[in-house]
Image (cartoon, rainbow, N blue to C red):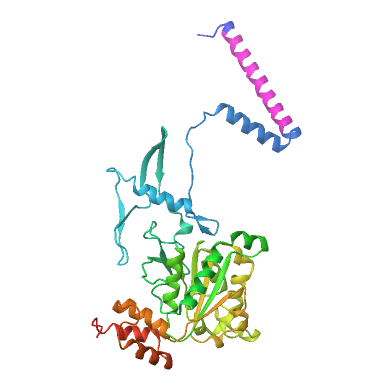
Amino acid sequence: MFPSSDNAFSLSTLFSVYASITGFMMLFRKMLNDFMPMQLRSYLFRLLDQLFTPKSNNLTVIIDEKFGSESNHVFEAAEIYLRKKISPDTKQLCVGKTTKEKHFTISIVKGEEIFDSFENSKMKWNYVESEENKFNEVKRYSKDAPGRGYYGSPGGSWGSITLDHPSTFDTLAMDPSAKKKIIDDLERFLKRKEFYKRVGKAWKRGYLLYGPPGTGKSSLIAAMANYLKFDIFDLELSSVQNNGEFKRILLSTTNRSILVIEDIDCNAEVRDREAENQERNMSRGTVTLSGILNFIDGLWSSAGDERIIVFTTNHKEQLDPALLRPGRMDMHIHMSYCTSLGFRTLVSNYLGLDGLNHPLCEEIEKLVDSTEVTPAELSEELMQDDDID
């Protein structure tokens, strides 16, 4: 059978219209490309896409562990919040407890999802880990602990333990006037945020603790942290490979913290600032004195607020004078041998004896003032027997 003339006419008309439309579209596309700027075309296409694409009510909020170079407090708050949202549907949990902690810590593991609701809005929490953060992770085993201690670990990252050191200013075997001077300086530092801002200085304070071994330098640091409720970051310079890594790991410390570098006199690089020695140190890939000074009072010193830097040394005279000047080490605290006033504090701590109620106290105090004995040595003797007599 042959198609009728009406069908043939309809097909020819259809092809004619199709050819006309196709030609028009090609002409329109050419004119669009030739006469309309690319930026305007992109804008029109985005506008059309928004008009004809159904809108989604879903919103994704990303909370990173780091905010710039500092820890993200929102991330820490989210971790604590999610511990209270663990349900029977949760498949995996992370449980841990260190010897210093009094309670177990339970948290969700990475990859776990938790469903929640807030003001009639459904929420889904997803704990993910990006590849770039795997090898530079700050582990906090007790986020809601009142104080934490951090120690430098290989590779420039930080490990952590809960700070539970019992040392306070009341238990320190120091002269009361020296303790009062330190406390007053700490209080003044905390209250002078606007002052530091007005004079154009970073809100930080440097303390140099120097004196013989066993005189209580570490105990003083713990007492400062307990008094201020600051975290402690303890860094071993020997574990840091170069100035770049030194700067990177220090920038990862938090505000309201004490950075401690103990026995800094044992690091040869901070005792010699000669140019040739600096070049030799750089070739060995170690932290140099210039690198330390640049972080303490250089441009990077303003990368945090309410920070205290503490250096300890047994031999102050071996340190480069550039490290000791005000603005770097603002307050030098001499941790001397024990005095009679310090001995009274030790007797009160270990034996519960206040004042001079024992007949031997006066005689022992005279001996303490006339000899060079450290608080650590006296403490060991007082621990030998609980009997006061």
Q: Could you tell me which quadrant the C terminus lies in? A: bottom left
Q: Closest to the observer: 283 or 109? A: 109
Q: Closest to the observer: 11 or 97? A: 97
Q: Quadrant of residue 371?
A: bottom left
In the image, is 90 to the left or to the right of 264?
Answer: left
Please, is residue 126 above or below residue 342 in the view? above
Q: Closest to the observer: 166 or 185? A: 185
The answer, for residue 250, to whether it is visible in the render is no
The answer, for residue 91, to whether it is visible in the render is yes
What span is colored magenta in the figure?
7-32
Q: Position of residue 254 (x, y in %)?
A: 50, 62
In the image, is 245 to the left or to the right of 118?
Answer: right
Please, is residue 316 above or below residue 329 in the view? below
Q: Which residue is at a point 30% across and 50% down the rendered structure image?
A: 92
Q: Which residue is at a point 37% across and 81% down the rendered structure image?
A: 344
Confirm whether the magenta stretch covers residue 3. no
Magenta residues: mostly which secondary structure? helix
In the image, is 17 to the left or to the right of 113?
Answer: right
Please, is residue 207 above or below residue 188 in the view? below
Count of numbered badges drawn on the protein: 0
Q: Which residue is at a point 36% across and 67% down the rendered structure image?
A: 164
Q: Quadrant of residue 4?
A: top right
In the image, is 207 to the left or to the right of 374?
Answer: right
Q: Closest to the observer: 159 or 31? A: 159
Q: Position of residue 47 (x, y in %)?
A: 63, 30
Q: Which residue is at a point 42% across and 90% down the rendered structure image?
A: 369
Q: Position of residue 303 (x, y in %)?
A: 58, 62
